[in-house]
Image (cartoon, rainbow, N blue to C red):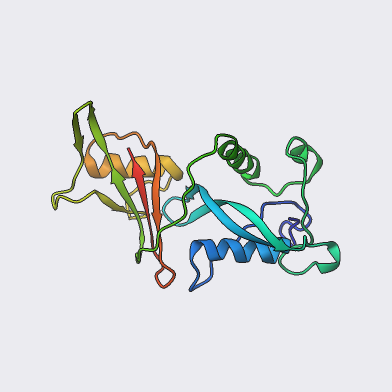
Amino acid sequence: MQEAKMSCRGAWYLPAGRMEPGETIEEGCVREVLEETGLQVQPVSLVMVEAGGGRWLRFTFSCRVTGGELKSTERADKESLQAGWFDLKSYAHTLELRPGKIIPLVETCYNWLEKKGRIYLPGSVPYDTLLIRLVCLSGEGDDLFVLLSEKLLLPVFAMGREGVPQTESLLFIASILKRDTTCCCEVLGLIAVDHKLDRAGCCLTLAA
């Protein structure tokens, strides 16, 4: 879609935006796509989650178009100027793209589709803050061990705490694991995302 904001007016970007109070993650996705492209979509799966130093999370979805009409310049508004479909091989060279990570995001989603990645949508569990839950296994064969806290629960960490390096994504998460478990864990991937519309928090469950 073509941006209408004065700071990047005319540049092209993926439909995106902030969630509104009372929305689930999927509802925010559906609303933003409709507002900025004119298309009605159904989220198929969560493909990627990015963490901005524990201050924000960005969710990238794969969606299926179910209806609506692609926004033209005659329907331009404060949300966007227009929307369009573009060839995956040439869009990066033919369009003025908004600065950011649009190309890596598109490539990640394309790879997910090509490899028929795991289909997963966020669960509905209430949290008041941004949390990370860790499932860390060690050993091999029949001798496997799981890392638990002193209360015999999976370790849970709050994001964005004072004193934690404000790096991004997995680097940020790895810094928390090293600090709170006194060991270096390799983050393998996202297992689950839990959020409920009447609460502001969210919990990411990671495998390590």
Specify the farthest residue to the top. Answer: 141
Q: Quadrant of residue 193?
A: bottom left
Q: Is residue 15 left or right of residue 115?
A: right
Residue at figure coordinates x 79%, y 44% from the top left = 95
Q: Position of residue 160 (x, y in %)?
A: 37, 55
Quadrant hosting residue 206: top left
Give how far across and how far down residue 81 sits, in percent.
79, 62
Q: Is residue 65 visible?
A: yes
On screen, residue 137 versus residue 36, left or right, reads left
Residue 58's place in the image compared with 190, above or below, is below
Say which residue appears at 45% left-offset and 44% top-offset: 169
Q: Is residue 171 left or right of residue 59?
A: left
Q: Quadrant of the C terminus?
A: top left
Residue 18 visible here: no
**Total count of labels:** 0
Name the residue located 42 percent from the left edge and 41 percent from the top edge: 170
Percent across and percent down for residue 139 are 22, 28
Which residue is the extreme one toward the right? 74
The quarter of the image holding the N terminus is bottom right
The reply, left or right, for residue 88 in relation to residue 143 is right
Residue 41 in percent (x, y) is at 64, 60
